[in-house]
């Protein structure tokens, strides 16, 4: 069957907090955005339970309920949704072309809000409830869930900077933090190691691999089954929470070689806007943020990306990662704002003619 062809001014890849906020702004600006929902409609918050740090919900809100509100708000202003995922993209010319299994989508501007996925161990007990204890004592985000572990004994799994950051942060709440690492030394930077070693609430369990997270929906997490890979012995280590801190993978594989990224795959944006290296393509949320990784920051950058797309469609200059500003028509304003390069390559001063020049001045 031939694919259905669609052509839209604004196409948004992803329906997490970043994508849906971009949709709310774009829809209210009359840009009729199309959201491709992807493999996880609603994004990462749909696999968590209580969200207590999203402003506006004084009593907290369940992650799936929060994302339902985002979606309804985007829908209210005319956002269109497709329940599919993007398989391939062609960004070599505008309109950009995106392919799902059933659609060929042409986009005048593209907002990439495809998020990131926490890396998991893949052991029994780790999956989100009800299959496992995810949300019932297993987490991959200390900033999000640390508060729920006041006075508790917890395990952090990993040996890199993420694990040291999470372990150090969690000592604000936990009575004891045990870092479980499969080697006898850490991969983390020296400064992060030193901070963790000096913290008397943190201890280390070396050469140990978590084989299972133990507990039940009634008790939550009660311990982890460890395997000592030097002594070749198994043991049960009691704890009330497990934080998996072995890194994140941004969902940006389809843009490799096209959009500029760091070595992990986070898309590089301008710094002053959400523009990528390709004019007309903007990125927001966890797909471009390896540091804050929060729903509110994802939503904030989603708002920025939509405003950038709106400016771009209005032929106004948008800051790019090089420091230049570029318009949809291909005019480039130099980083120092001194010169304007026109689409045919001619460079002219970026100065208005002196006021009154044509009438002889003052
Ligand atoms: C267990 C857990 C608990 C958390 N708790 C909190 C919390 O309490 N507070 C907080 O602020 N943050 C929390 N976070 C972090 C927060 O969820 C993320 O920072 C936020 O969801 C990032 O939003 P995003 O829109 O950038 O990406 P995501 O939420 O990751 O959404 C990405 C979207 O892109 C789509 N997508 C991916 N690939 C494709 C493709 N090829 N084609 C089309 N669509 C695609 C997905 O379907 C999804 O809709 C938590 C995260 C986790 C994992």
Image (spheres, rainbow, N blue to C red):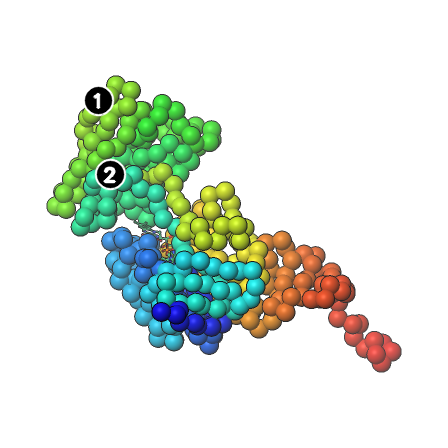
Secondary structure state at the residue bearing disc 2: loop
The residue where tag 1 is placed is 233
The structure residue drawn at horizontal position 43% and vertical position 28%, both measured from the top left corner, is 194
Ligand 1 is found in which quarter of the picture? bottom left
Nearest the viewer among 185 and 107 is 107
Whether residue 321 is situated above or below residue 307 in the rendered picture: above
State the residue at coordinates (28%, 44%).
139
Give the Cα separation between the discs numbered 1 and 2.
18 Å
Q: Is residue 107 above or below residue 125?
A: below
Of the residues under marks 1 and 2, which one precedes in the sequence? 2
Residue 141 picture location, percent across and down: 33, 45
Does residue 308 show up? no
How far from the left and from the top, in percent, is residue 92? 56, 60
Label 1 C-beta lies within 8 Å of the nearest ligand 1 atom: no
| Residue 123 tag number | 2
Give the residue drawn at x 63%, y 55%.
Answer: 323
Extreme front residue here? 1
């Amino acid at each position: 069957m031939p694919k259905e062809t669609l052509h839209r001014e604004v196409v948004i890849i992803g329906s997490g907090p970043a994508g849906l906020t971009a949709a709310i702004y774009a829809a209210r600006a009359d840009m009729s955005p199309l959201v491709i929902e992807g493999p996880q409609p609603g994004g990462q918050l749909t696999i968590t339970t209580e969200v207590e740090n999203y402003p506006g919900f004084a009593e907290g809100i369940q992650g799936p309920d929060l994302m339902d509100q985002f979606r309804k708000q985007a829908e209210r202003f005319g956002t269109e949704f497709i329940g599919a995922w993007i398989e391939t993209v062609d960004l070599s010319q505008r309109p950009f072309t995106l392919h799902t299994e059933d659609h060929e989508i042409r986009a005048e501007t593209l907002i990439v809000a495809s998020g990131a996925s926490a890396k998991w161990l893949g052991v029994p007990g780790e999956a989100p409830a009800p299959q496992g204890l995810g949300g019932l004592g297993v987490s991959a985000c200390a900033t999000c869930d640390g508060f729920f572990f006041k006075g508790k004994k917890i395990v952090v799994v990993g040996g890199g900077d993420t694990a040291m950051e999470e372990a150090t942060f969690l000592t604000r709440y936990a009575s004891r933090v045990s870092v479980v690492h499969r080697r006898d030394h850490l991969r983390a930077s020296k400064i992060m190691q030193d901070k963790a070693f000096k913290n008397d609430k943190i201890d280390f369990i070396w050469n140990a691999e978590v084989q299972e997270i133990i507990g039940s929906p009634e008790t939550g997490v009660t311990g982890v089954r460890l395997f000592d890979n030097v002594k070749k012995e198994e043991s049960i280590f009691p704890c009330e929470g497990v934080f998996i801190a072995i890194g994140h993978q941004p969902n940006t594989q389809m843009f490799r070689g096209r959009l500029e990224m760091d070595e992990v795959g986070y898309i590089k944006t301008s710094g002053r806007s959400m523009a990528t290296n390709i004019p007309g393509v903007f990125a927001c949320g966890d797909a471009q943020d390896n540091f804050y990784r929060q729903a509110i920051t994802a939503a904030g950058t989603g708002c920025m990306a939509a405003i950038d797309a709106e400016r771009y469609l209005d032929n106004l200059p948008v800051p790019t990662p090089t420091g230049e500003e570029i318009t949809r028509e291909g005019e480039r304003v130099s980083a120092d704002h001194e010169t304007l390069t026109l689409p045919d390559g001619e460079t002219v001063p970026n100065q208005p003619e002196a006021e009154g020049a044509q009438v002889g001045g003052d």
